[in-house]
Amino acid sequence: MAESLTTHLVLARKWRPERFSELVGQEHVTRTLSEALKRGRIAHAFLFTGIRGVGKTTAARILARCLNCEKGPTAEPCGECAACVEIRGGRSLDVSEIDGATYRKIEDARAIIENLSYRPARDRFKIYIIDEAHQLTDSAFNALLKTLEEPPPHVKFILATTEPQKMPETILSRLQRYDFRRIPYATILERLKDLARREGLEVEESALRLLAREAGGSMRDAERMLETAMATATASGKVTEAEVASSLGVASRTTVLKLADAILEKNAAGALAHVRELKSRGANLESLGRDLLETFRNLAVAKLPASDADSPLDDIPDHEVTELKRLAAGASSRDLMRLFRLMADSQEQILRSPYPDLLLEMAVVRMASLAAVIDADELLRAIGSDKTAAPPASGTPPAPSGGGSSSRGAAKPEAASKEQSSGARRLRVEGEVKADAPLRHEVQDNSPRELPELRDFIRGRRAALAGFMEQGAGLVLDGDLLTVTARNDIYVRYLNDNKTVIAELASEHLGRAIRVELSTNGVAKLAAAGRATIPLGGNGLTRELPSAAAADTNNPIATKNAQKETAASKPVEPTGEIAPTPPAMDAARRAATPEERQAVLADPAVRRVFDTLDARLVELRIPNLAPASAREGGDPESR
Amino acid sequence: MPIDSIRGHRELASRLLAELRSRPSHAYLFAGPRGVGKALVATSLVHALMCERSPGENFCCNPARCPVRLAPQTERTRARAADADTPRCDCCSACVQIATGVHPDFTYVSRPVGRTEVLIDQVRELIARLGIRPSRSPVRMAIIDDAESLNIPAQNALLKTLEEPPGHAIIIMVSASERALLDTVRSRTRTVRFPALQVADLEAILAAHGIDDKARASALALLARGSAANAIALADGDEPPMKELLDALSTAKSIDFARAQSLAQEFFANRDAAAGNFELLARLLEEILCYKLLKTDFVAFPPDSRPKLASLADSLGVDAVVKCIDAAVRATEAVEANANPRLQAENWWTIAGHAMRGE
């Protein structure tokens, strides 16, 4: 046991490259260094940077041998002379490899500096390799400044670090810097195959691919993972992909594809089951999230025309590409993009959260229950085809007489647009909503005397409410009906909450029962008054609302209560400010029944539109002439 | 048969032991949730490799019977353990030395009491010790417990050693979080992931811990969420208010602000309680989601709360459950990031009410 415990070396150490030609993936560095060595133009201080496991320390050691080899300085150290052998064994007197993270203090730097003046014991140069150099303290760096700038001719410095940005500028400017790159997938795969052959190990090609992919550009990671896989698979002989996947705690490609399949098939249960299964096996859920994200990327790529798709997918084996294409064929690229977006957002959270499992589960359930995207063109076509059943436009001029919108509530685009020319029917998706209506001012008060008194009364009782009413609303008193016309959404909500209070106060003041009605009519008009532009929705898409009929019929608040009440009462005419509803429209349409409302709301296409536009159903009218088609299709005529 | 007595990770442990005896890596990282037995496996492996009477799977120190291993690791109790009245175990001297932390070839590093980090000086000392040839056994082993709390300089100081330690050294890092470790550290270690414990394993652990009531054991096992440490802490301490929260959830559909406020006051008044209860809510809802989608039963719950869970599940849409869980996770994170727990709770209950009503 003692022997086996002490003689075994992990792959990364056992097969550490010994010459520049073996150091794969960093040809830009090795070529430059070899040239410099051949021409004898060697700098006195080097900096090797790059992510973990790409060959910085290895390159530093090779460079040390190149410099100190008896036959050198050469780009091809002999590997046989005393210097080469000793450096390989880490015993050379003239090459010191210093752990910059442990010996990071100024005392340590001083110790180096003190020894510089002595000639090398035997070899050509005294070489200091300072690994993890980013951990040196500031004072240690500063102590080294003069030395790094002009060391004695027999001294070479090689600094290696993963985090050059942590080093002072003054140090960086004195070093010849070589940036090591992430090692390409294909190179890692090649090297892993080579290692497996040298170790006499049978490994499935797909397993090696998985390893190469998981390595993320770091050769050491790849070798370490191959080591892990070998350790778990010694019993069975051949290393399979499944074994590798389980030893790494990642999902195999097949599993990830199955999960993606379940999501695309809208099979929330299946997707959730997959995730829970992986979770119970202790899989790394962060990497699963990343794999899933990558799969959606690949699916989107697979959707592209073949000639374009070839290059971005060439890391992926053929059978997987076939599978990707099959999956992609079943989904629209828009859907794939949305799934990708959703997953990308979730992944960001997953990486930060202490509960990655929950978030991942929710992400897949959410993705699997995502309603399909309806193409806006298709939707409009659907709306357009419905229009054929509606009565022809009754001569309403497409005059921009009064328009506007709010993000909620007061919008009724289709009802109006349908009545207009085909050009106006298009749902225009533009930057903002413009209200071009001629300016009209405040809603008038019908009873000039009563209202100010009522306002004062309310101010005396409920100052905040009065403030709201003054700032944000116009009042119309018509017999027993007090219509409060709100200026915008915020006021609407507030006033709606306080409707009963207003009613009570008004009744008390006027000495008779007063009904309070809320109207958002003012929203449109006041928006128009300010030539307001109201951005809609969170996605930058907004709609331009058709004008004319949009703001005419008094739009009640979008709550169900308000809806019912308005349905019962006659809409308040705001004193002829706006062109009245075309009579043809009233004749042609009737209010929808609650069932119809439900049916329309349940329609995925409608929901999608509502989501996109951030809208709410306020009022629904069904063309009288074609009740059947309306019931089938569900036509969100006015919102 | 000590390795066999490791609940939930038997296979993993014996595989690791086999690996250590044939072709060991020089540095391991045991990663997995807190309290699932990572450190237990690590020390068992040390025993297995260093035991002098019967090395291997059946090393002589049996954690279930070992007074030394069971004793808490403070100086006072250690002194008491050395008293004459404490029962003596029949372990070999190497095992006893390992258990007490005085084995010459074994170093155990963990977060010092009262500190939040493992310090760089501890790491330096460890590195120095690793350089010395082993005196008693063929290898020198080190366990770095709480590795997630190694500070950055300490992790960096370890890098060179983790990459190329002296030939006789094996380092096992035990970390509750992989992410807390630098890429450069992870890249140098062989990572072994520990899954959360199954409910059955937890029940067995609780039974061994003296919880005889089977129903209570299974309820605790469920709440422990795969962590033996949690299970035992729950068994010793207050039970989480699962029943109350479940009741509140059942009526959340018609929740008003006053009720939300009183719930927040009662269960989410301070940071710890809030974080715990939010997670509990999230897990309850997760079970509900699984019930809805995967048709799993609420086997792990006490029988009297099952019908309630089922009717709650039936009354909710998948959408609503997803929304509630998302909000709960977000609230937990917010609370952990120093948000006011009570406000978060009021907000959560309001969101949950809205979601459940389908708004």
Image (cartoon, rainbow, N blue to C red):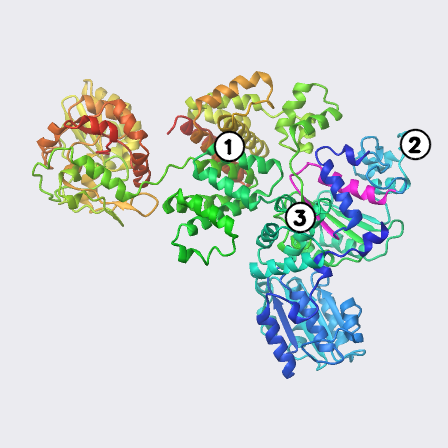
Q: Chain of mark 1?
A: B
Of badges 3 and 2, the one in the foreground is 3
Residue bearing the label numbered 1: B342
Left or right: where B62 falls relative to A251: right
Image quadrant assignment for residue A14: bottom right
* Residue receiving disc 2: B84
Rate crowding at label 2 as few (under 14), some (14 to 19) or many (20 or more) other CA atoms within 10 Å: few
Estimate the spatial distance between the alpha carbons at disc 1 and disc 2, rounded to whole Å. Answer: 52 Å
Number of marks? 3
Taking the image as shown, residue A57 lies to the left or right of residue B319, namely: right
In front: label 1 or label 2: 2
Q: Nearer the viewer, residue A526 or B141?
A: B141
- Residue marked by disc 3: A239
Q: Is residue B326 left or right of residue A600?
A: right
| In magenta stretch: residue B32 | yes
Task: Give how far across and how far down residue A501 sits, in percent.
Answer: 28, 24
Badge 3 amino acid: Val
